[in-house]
Amino acid sequence: MTLAGCSDDGGSGDDGSSDDGSGDDGSMDDGSDDGSGDTSELEIVHWWTAGGEQDAFNALLDGFREANPDVEVVDNPAPGGAGSAIDAVIQNRVIDGNPPSTFQIWPGQALTPYTNEDLLEDIGDSVWDDEMRDAYLDGVVELSQPAGDLVAVPINIHRLNNLFYNVSVVEDAGVDPSTIDSPQGLLDALETIDAETDATPLAHQTQSPWSSLQLWENVFIGQQSVDDYQTLLDGDVEGLEDEVRSALELLADYLEYIPEDAGSITWDQGNDGLIAGDAAFLHQGDWAAGQYEGASDFEFSDDWDMVPFPGTSGVYHSVIDSFVFPTNNPSPEATEQFLNYAGTVDAQERFNPIKGSIPPRTDVPMDEFGDFLTRQFEDFQNSDSQPPTIAHGTGVAPAIHSALDETFANFNGNLDVDAAYEGIRDAF
Ligand code: BGC
């Protein structure tokens, strides 16, 4: 539960030129392919196509290409916020022995279906050299080895428990977000926005269940504590029945204040409403700030700002993305080059300021991160805990996660607290 505060300095070990030195094939055979041998075509599957995500990914690819001009990148996205469409593509391909070179995945529990079946290479020697291990936060390294071997390269740390807002909309309504001190207080603020302005109080999407699931997680932590949340992750839902129901009831109240077309929009379309001044608040990971970065005439502090989700101020509810080396790899050398690069200072310095995240390496210069991410970074360093999330896969096994997705898909439609409680209990 502690990603922050560990690990030390590291030096500058950066540059991104990767090299590795292992070039000599031989090893990574793993019974792979078909005889066509290694290629320098690198197929990457990811879901970064919305908001500012694509810009961040392109910045990463630019850096990789500069350092590795011999590799041809095949950018093969599986669009869908929070990876909602990627599993269907990836799981079948990996199981069928036809994986892409690498794919985006949350480290931690989300990796376990693959590690259980030995479908990911151990990259503890080929990629995770001593320099890299020393530079990374210890907690992030741990998440990269759920079954012992190091199998993933994390590239960012997002925060989930953010409440973003449009400054002029909340001012028009006379609402001061910094004074909202509980999840219930947020409901009062939404009511005020509704009464005092024409704006949508909460720019929430319900087309896909993950945004309601993550909001419920944050209401739960805000009403209770990180310790209770951890008890929940450990599976004791019945011991926390009243608390689980209380968070569901408040979530149902919030959902009275979302866009009329919430059921047919994506997270970034909801956020477009906030940018346009048609919505007041958004609960979302700080990938939403990546979208603000790319918007014109929409400046941090003057036009938008964020407070930690009410009741969670010492918490950095973390969401991490990583890349892996599937077995039967179509391009072992190029994949290794890419993973080596993803672990460098250069990669993380290019990617994170645009993505709206902070780096998992401790030695990335923060000069280019801007005021918002500099503040997030300080919050991270001063945070009391950095629990993993449910909706973004680090905290629960994928089978639990998908059962909860189903529960919250139903809840988005019927706001039935009894049914949702039972769904949560049964999922765990
Ligand atoms: C990922 C982020 C991404 C967000 C929305 C999260 O699960 O970790 O990188 O921006 O989903 O798609």
Image (cartoon, rainbow, N blue to C red):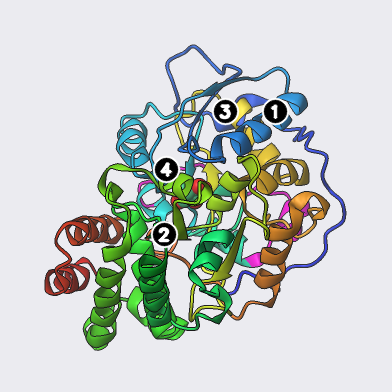
- Residue holding disc 2: 109
Tag 4: amino acid: Gln
Question: Quick one: label 3, few (<14), some, or many (20+) residues within 10 Å?
Answer: many
* Residue drawn at x 56%, y 32% as measured from the top left: 28
* Residue drawn at x 45%, y 48% as measured from the top left: 273
Q: What's the CA distance linking mark 4 and mark 2?
A: 29 Å
**Mark nearer the viewer, 1 or 4:** 4
In the depicted view, which residue is nearer to us: 190 or 34?
190
- Residue holding disc 1: 62
Mark nearer the N terminus (3 vs 2): 2
Pointers 3 and 1 in contact (CB under 8 A)?
no
Q: What's the CA distance linking mark 1 and mark 4?
A: 27 Å
Could you say which disc has been placed on residue 332 in the image? 3
Question: Looking at this rendering, what residue extends furthest in the right direction?
Answer: 11
Q: Secondary structure at mark 1?
A: helix
Give coordinates of residue 292: x percent, y percent.
59, 47
Residue 166 lies, with reference to residue 276, above or below; the image says: below
Pointers 2 and 1 in contact (CB under 8 A)?
no
Could you say which disc has been placed on residue 21 in the image? none
Q: What's the CA distance linking mark 4 and mark 3?
A: 38 Å
Give the position of the N terminus as an image quadrant: bottom right
Verify whether residue 133 appears in magenta: yes
Left or right of 236: which side holds 353? right
In the depicted view, which residue is nearer to us: 29 or 339?
339
Considering the whole magenta stretch, tell me its main secondary structure: loop
Give the position of the C terminus as an image quadrant: bottom left
Tag 2: amino acid: Gln
Q: Secondary structure at mark 3?
A: helix
**Mark nearer the viewer, 2 or 1:** 1
Pointers 4 and 2 in contact (CB under 8 A)?
no
